Image (cartoon, rainbow, N blue to C red):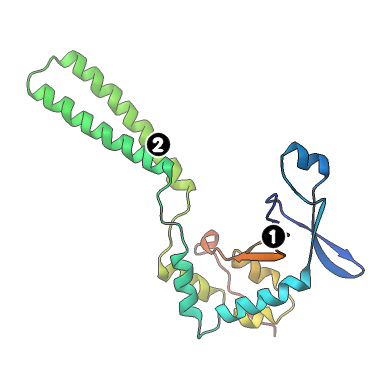
């Protein structure tokens, strides 16, 4: 779940002297070939990350802060229509306008032969645009309602309790956690994304 901010690759786990680390190794020849200014090795000690990470998650998902966290997750979702969607919608609207003009021309007594050809061509263009729109909408992220996010968060169960347990990885995974390590500032950006688990979260519980 930890990525290098320089190259956007997943960092690899390893142990040094019994201590867990994450490393991103980027040979110099790869850096030159890809025009990336990347250190030969980037290291992040695991316990330097997990303690503040767990403190953040525990504070965000306590009952007192849960409503605020749900609101923040709802507001953080993308709102802008993608350029692909906007282009397909514009094409469909333009085709509809043309089809209306062609039908009006037929009603006014225009020669049916050329007008019918125009209609056929425009309808084919509209069909392609509709297919493009459907494909784009299936792949682009969709906004979730506040109630959906709240249901998913509550389905996770006692997050604070599980964070005190040994197996934290499942909590991280179900939260859709992504961590990006910036080596220059030695900081980690943590982001939670529940959209990948729409209605599929299995409740997590603390140790027994």
106 sits left or right of 117 in the view: left
The x, y position of residue 42, in whole percent, is 79, 57
Of callouts 1 and 2, the N-terminal one: 2
- Crowd around label 2: few <14 · some 14–19 · many ≥20 (10 Å): few
Closest to the observer: 11 or 100?
11
Q: Which residue is mark 1?
A: 182
> Is the residue under label 2 in contact with that under label 1 (CB below 8 Å)?
no
From the image, state whether disc 1 or disc 2 is nearer to you. Answer: 1
The x, y position of residue 91, in whole percent, is 32, 34
Q: Is residue 178 visible?
A: yes
Does dot 2 land on a helix, a strand or a loop? helix
Question: Which image quarter holds the N terminus?
Answer: bottom right
Question: Which image quarter holds the C terminus?
Answer: bottom right
Q: Which residue is mark 2?
A: 131
Look at 77% across and 73% down and name the residue there: 47
The x, y position of residue 207, in whole percent, is 69, 83
32 sits left or right of 157 in the view: right
Closest to the observer: 112 or 29?
29
Mark linked to residue 15? none
With respect to residue 179, does 63 lie above or below? below
With respect to residue 177, does 94 lie above or below? above
Does dot 1 land on a helix, a strand or a loop? strand
Q: CA distance from mark 1 to mark 2?
A: 40 Å
Quarter where residue 197 is shown: bottom right
The x, y position of residue 162, in whole percent, is 66, 79
Look at 16% across and 28% down and name the residue there: 101
Q: Is residue 150 visible?
A: no
Look at 60% across and 67% down and name the residue there: 174
145 sits left or right of 103 in the view: right
Quarter where residue 52 is shown: bottom right
Residue at far left of view: 108
- Crowd around label 1: few <14 · some 14–19 · many ≥20 (10 Å): some
């Amino acid at each position: 779940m930890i990525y290098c901010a320089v190259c956007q690759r997943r960092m690899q786990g390893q142990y040094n002297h019994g201590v867990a680390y994450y490393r991103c190794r980027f040979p110099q020849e790869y850096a030159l070939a890809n025009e990336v200014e990347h250190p030969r090795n980037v290291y992040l000690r695991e316990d330097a990350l997990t303690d503040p990470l767990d403190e953040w998650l525990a504070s965000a998902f306590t009952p007192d802060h849960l409503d605020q966290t749900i609101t923040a997750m709802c507001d953080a979702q993308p709102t802008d229509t993608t350029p692909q969607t906007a282009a397909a919608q514009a094409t469909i609207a333009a085709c509809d306008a043309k089809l209306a003009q062609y039908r009006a021309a037929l009603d006014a007594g225009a020669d049916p032969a050329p007008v019918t050809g125009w209609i056929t061509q425009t309808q084919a263009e509209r069909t392609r645009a509709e297919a493009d729109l459907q494909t784009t909408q299936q792949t682009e992220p969709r906004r979730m309602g506040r109630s959906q996010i709240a249901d998913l968060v509550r389905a996770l169960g006692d997050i604070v309790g599980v964070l005190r347990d040994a197996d934290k990885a499942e909590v991280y995974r179900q939260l859709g956690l992504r961590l990006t390590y910036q080596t220059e500032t030695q900081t980690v950006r943590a982001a939670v994304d529940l959209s990948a688990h729409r209605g599929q979260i299995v409740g997590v519980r603390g140790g027994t």
